Amino acid sequence: MVTSLSTDPEREQLVFGHRIDWDTTSAVKFEGLPTATARELLDAGYMNPEATCGASPTMGEMVAFMERYGKDAIPESEGEMSAHGRVLAPDHPDGGVVIEGLKYLGPTSDTFVREFAALFYEAESFMLEKDLHGRCWFA
């Protein structure tokens, strides 16, 4: 169990490519986070692997799903997997990186469709069209 998340500026660099002025905001949204960056954030302690966003699977489960179905796992895949969420200010009680959902664009397999539906059906926003895309968002 992670008790203290790392909140140094490197997490902002990984997600946004620049530092954030935390004197003006308490959270910054992101979209299009690649699978490899999500894994790096998790491994570096910027994300609690057991945390959830509402009724979502854990952060660890979401990153693992990205790894199973992203281009790195299926090189011949024409699809693109990414995460969206927010980075919380260092002084926020939950300070860290939170994945609020995933987006996949491209061809899908029956296994992908079944697993996406099983893991993410409780999302506030859920879209899944076989051979087109899958998207979920948790509040």
Image: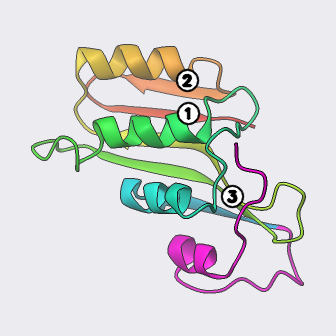
Left or right of 3, for residue 23: right
Q: Residue furthest left?
A: 76
User: For mark 1, what is the residue?
Assistant: 136
Question: Closer to the camera, 60 or 2?
Answer: 2
Circle 1 crowding by C-alpha within 10 Å: few under 14, some 14–19, many from 20: many
- Label 2 close to label 3 by CB (< 8 Å): no
Which residue does the image show at 9% across and 43% down from the upper left?
A: 76
- Label 1 close to label 2 by CB (< 8 Å): yes
User: For mark 3, what is the residue?
Assistant: 86
State whether residue 97 is above or below residue 78: below
Residue 9 covered by magenta stretch: yes
Residue 18 covered by magenta stretch: yes
Dominant secondary structure of the magenta stretch?
loop
Report how many numbered discs are placed on residues in the image.
Answer: 3
Mark with earlier residue (2, 3): 3
State whether residue 13 is above or below residue 49: below
CA gap, disc 2 to disc 3? 18 Å
Left or right of 25, for residue 133: left
Which residue does the image show at 37% across and 13% down from the upper left?
A: 114
Looking at the picture, which amino acid does disc 3 mark? Arg
User: For mark 2, what is the residue?
Assistant: 120
In the image, the segment drawn in magenta is: 1-26
Left or right of 11, for residue 64: left
Question: Closer to the camera, 138 or 66?
Answer: 66
Label 1 sits on a secondary structure element that is strand
Nearer the viewer's eye, disc 1 or disc 2?
2
Q: Quadrant of the C terminus?
A: top right
Label 3 sits on a secondary structure element that is strand
Which residue does the image show at 46% across and 62% down from the upper left?
A: 40
